[in-house]
Image (tube, rainbow, N blue to C red):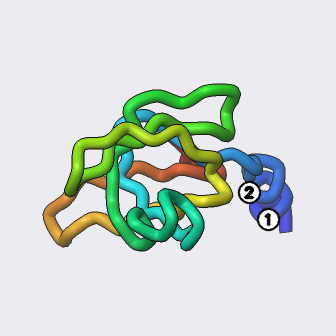
Amino acid sequence: EEDKEVEAAAVQDNWLHKGIVVKVVNKKVGDGRYYKKKGVVKQVHDKYVAEVAMNDTGHVLKLDQEHLETVIPSVDGEVLVVNGRYRG
């Protein structure tokens, strides 16, 4: 019971972190050219906006986290907890 309260208190509404791989989930970004494409967060602004360097084109896009989702790393890939008690 107490663990659930501690965990709930640790959850935040922002999850962006520099260096993580993200995927664009908004079909309207770049008229759909970037939909489901992956990139790396190069910088985070105001907790909710990221500069993302796209893997396939190298273009740097400034996107709200609402238009992004995290990418699960490969089996041997590095993991970063982006929310909750063990965040960071």
- Left or right: where does residue 21 sit relative to residue 24? left
Q: Residue at (47%, 35%) from the top-left corner?
A: 51
Give, as a three-letter code, the residue at label 2: Glu
How many residues crowd mark 2 within 10 Å: few (<14), some (14–19), many (20+)? few
Q: Are marks 1 and 2 in contact (CB under 8 Å)?
A: yes
Q: Residue at (54%, 30%) from the top-left corner?
A: 44
> In the image, is residue 46 above or below residue 87?
above
Q: Can you identify the residue that label 2 sits on?
A: 7
Q: Can you identify the residue that label 1 sits on?
A: 4
- Left or right: where does residue 86 sit relative to residue 42? right
In the picture, the disc for residue 47 is none
Q: Residue at (67%, 58%) from the top-left corner?
A: 66
> Helix, strand or loop at disc 1?
helix
> Helix, strand or loop at disc 2?
helix
How many residues crowd mark 1 within 10 Å: few (<14), some (14–19), many (20+)? few
Q: CA distance from mark 1 to mark 2?
A: 5 Å
Image location (x, y in percent) of residue 41: 40, 40
Image location (x, y in percent) of residue 53: 33, 41
